[in-house]
Amino acid sequence: MATALTPATIASQLHSRFLSEQDATRLFYLLPHQQQKAFAIQFLAPDPGAGTSSITRDFAVVASNRLGLNILLISISEATGKAASVIHHRYALPLQAVTDLDLTFNGNLSAFRVQQIPLSIVIPNEHVGSRLHQRDWINFVTSQENNFDLILIDSPAASASHMGAGLSANVDANIIVLEAEKTDYNKTRYLINCIEEVKGYILGTILNKRHFYIPNSIYKKI
């Protein structure tokens, strides 16, 4: 039987790990206010390993825990094993399973709520993700637009799946996550072209895993 987490332990997990809260909050100031439905943002990268899941997680935590927004985080990549274990490993958050048929997309998804904050997370059940097509995801996002303030989509890398590029025109904005010093320019250009060809909107890029070779004290003087 799992040990119940104390409020202090839960609170210690509800923080941004890789982004400063100031940087994460700056994004939300760029979004339109007083929308009639949830604003949907997709995070995707040209190649695996850029840290897309970590970036999506941090934005979700800041938006829900600091700004009080009701957030839905959609993990497009299916669970390879028990969904609860996969989600915990992917996002490192205190979770509670929910059985709402609307949120589980008639049993195709496993759904969780993060304790103490208004953040829900869904992931395809094992062996289900490959059966969920672009139209299914569009229908699911549309069905949740009136239930949340913000929908954040954690999509697989473009080199591993065409789903992110396919969904790009059906969300309000796309953010491309790049791994500093590793992400290939040509693959990045290809992903941008794919999004632009379907008239998807690119809000910006995030340079993740950046190494600072010059001390911060020197950077401040430049």
Image (cartoon, rainbow, N blue to C red):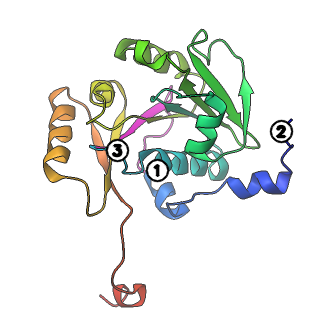
Tell me the amino acid under the disc marked 3.
Answer: Pro
The quadrant holding residue 11 is bottom right
What label sits on residue 2 in the rendered view?
2
- Residue at 72 percent across and 17 percent down: it is 99
Q: Is residue 36 magenta?
A: yes
User: How far, Cα to Cα, is label 1 from label 2?
Assistant: 28 Å
- Of marks 1 and 2, the one in the foreground: 2
Dots 3 and 2: beta carbons under 8 Å? no
Q: Badge 2: how crowded within 10 Å, few (<14), some, or many (20+)?
A: few
User: Circle 2 sits in a helix, a strand or a loop, which is it?
Assistant: loop
- Residue at 41 percent across and 84 percent down: it is 216
User: Circle 1 sits in a helix, a strand or a loop, which is it?
Assistant: helix
Work out which quarter of the rendered image holds the N terminus and state it: top right
Reply above or below: 222 against 46: below
Q: Is residue 103 magenta?
A: no
- Residue at 36 percent across and 77 percent down: it is 212
Q: Badge 3: how crowded within 10 Å, few (<14), some, or many (20+)?
A: some
User: Circle 3 sits in a helix, a strand or a loop, which is it?
Assistant: loop
- Name the residue carrying label 3: 48
User: How far, Cα to Cα, is label 3 from label 2?
Assistant: 32 Å
Tell me the amino acid under the disc marked 2.
Answer: Ala
Magenta range: 29-45
- Name the residue carrying label 1: 55
The image position of residue 79, as x and y in percent, is: 53, 28
- Numbered label tally: 3
Q: Earlier in the sequence, mark 3 or mark 2?
A: 2
Tell me the amino acid under the disc marked 1.
Answer: Ile
